[in-house]
Image (tube, coloured by chain):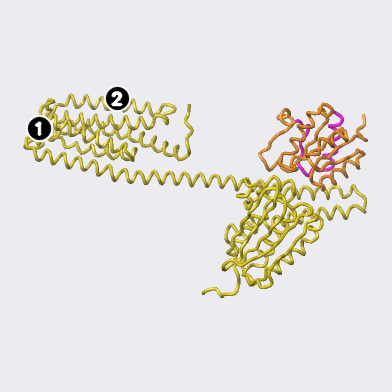
Amino acid sequence: MNQPSSPGNSARADETFRQLAWFVRLRWLAIAGVLATLPLAWFLLRLRFQPVPLLAVTVWLAVYNFFLNWQLRRPAATARLASLARAQIILDICSLVLLLYLGGGIENPFSFYLVFHTAIAAIIFPGLGSLVITTLTFGLYALMVVLDWTGTIPHFPLTGLYPVSPYQTVSPMLANLFVFGSTLYIVRYFTAAISRRLSHRTDELAAANRKLQEADRTRLQSIITVTHELRSPAAAAASLLEVLDRVGPEERPGLIDRARQRIGGMLRLIEDLLDLHQLDLGTTKVEAAPLLVAAVVEAAAAEHAALARERGVTVRVELAPDLPPVKANARYLEFTVSNLLSNAIQYNRPGGSVTVSARLTGAFLEVEVVDTGIGIPEADLPRVFDVFYRGDEAKKTSRLAPGLGLSLVKRLVQAQGGTVRVESQAGKGSRFFFTVPIAGKPEPA
Amino acid sequence: MTTKGKRILIIDDDTDFITATRTILAGAGYEVADCTRAVEALARVREFAPDLIVLDVMMETGTAGFHVSYEVRKDPHFAKTPILMVTAIHQTTPLRFSPETDGEYLPVQKLLDKPVPADVLLQEVAHLLESA
């Protein structure tokens, strides 16, 4: 069964797969290199060694490279990538140490090629894995040198390169081992550090990409919703106009008026959408002037008096007369107050009330709109300011509002330098708060 | 067989659609009643006993109309009453269904996009009533 994997993991698996395929190609190059070096060293440099065991190891290299390549191409290779990577590194190290041993041991200068394997291990396993592999590499090499030097295993000499074999004296041999070992560990440290940073960055990019894809889907969903919200009133208006010639002259003005209202609602929605998108783009220049919140609240209360009467809701404005003027955009502030008030009345119950009050908090005036209405379920609270989000209860109360008001309120308040928040309990009512900076102090130039 | 005098129930929460649809159908001689809430739809169907139902998809919830159609079908008296579903979301959501291909999934006879032109509505209603 396939393991569920996150996109970050699958991006990293893809990367490991590419690396392994690349190592297979490198191994063919290495095999070609060995096959070219042997005659070159024999005939050109006139070095003497035992070519048959060396050729045998080269054939062995080719065999397992074929095998690794086949394993990589098999379906569901992803699940075995880590074990394949470990296996090939260990096989490579053992093969190279064997090649070195059969080609003179410490007398063979190709021993430094083991550095490549340390680097490769550090790329694939930036953690403890590469430290284990580095230690294994150095351990095998040191073991080979010591056993070769002490004569525990037969020596395959490489003659013609050094006038005297490094095995003859102890200090060059120890120096060789020390420099060789420290080189391995230092290379491992640097490579692992870079590899870790790269893989961290890959994860970050994968996460960012995931977020962008989600945002794109949300945006597409919102385009579909907008289209629907625009289509409904347009379809209603068209239906009303379609039946004009089927009704008597006394009924026509009523139908035309309804159609006009639906088109008017559609236009308001389009204007709100434009405002919303321009505020999101940050292309709107906010013109702010000193304003009295009390005047805006009173005007909004008067505007909604008829709705409040119809719903049997009492609206109370409790604003202290000495509140300082705020620095705000008149249209933004009017929309904000009007929207919060209209919600508080609409999502209320007969006999309920709405209270608007305000208080000073530092350099801001905090306006509070409290209602005794249907409230907002806790699960909906984090999303009430999202574009087109409407709670189920809100949908039942008024279907025709598309759910743009609060998202616009949030943007308008923020555009003036304020914040907006909500406290609510389902069935008990809601408290919406928003802040506006107070006017007075001239802004520093 | 005449279709005039047949009873049609319009279930839609948009009163403007009801006005327009009622005008067209009543003008053609049908007896028309309406219902604006999906939760009351079944009771209204039983009370009015329509020969055909014009049903909106989106009401209290985005799919309220679907649930109404299932409920109506469950009542043996109305299991075969033709349902003409109308929607404004057909072309703007991934909901791609037709009675031909998804007849078992959605128990309605016809699905039309709003706004439905008067002649199309009358033609479909007459056709559904005749074949019922």
Image side of residue A331 versus residue A208, left or right: right
Question: From this viewpoint, is residue A354 visible?
Answer: yes
Residue A37 in the image: state x and y as whole percent: 19, 33
Label 1 residue SS: loop
Q: Residue A66 carries which label?
A: none
Q: Are marks 1 and 2 in contact (CB under 8 Å)?
A: no
Colour of chain A as rendered = yellow
Q: How would you rate the neighbour count of disc 1 (Cα within 10 Å): few for under 14, some for 14-19, many for 20 or more? A: some
Chain containing the residue with disc 1: A
Image side of residue A356 versus residue A210, left or right: right
Residue extent of the magenta highlight: B107-132
Question: From this viewpoint, is residue B124 visible?
Answer: no
Q: Residue A63 carries which label?
A: 2
Q: Find residue B84 and report its image quarter.
A: top right
Residue that badge 1 annotates: A159
- The three-letter amino acid code for the residue at tag 2 is Val
Image side of residue B127 versus residue A139, left or right: right
Residue A252 in the image: state x and y as whole percent: 89, 53
Q: Find residue A359 and report its image quarter.
A: bottom right
Chain shown in orange: B
Q: Residue at point 30% right, 26% down? A: A64
Depth order, front residue of A387/A162: A387
Instruction: Check the image and report above or below for A373 versus B73.
Output: below
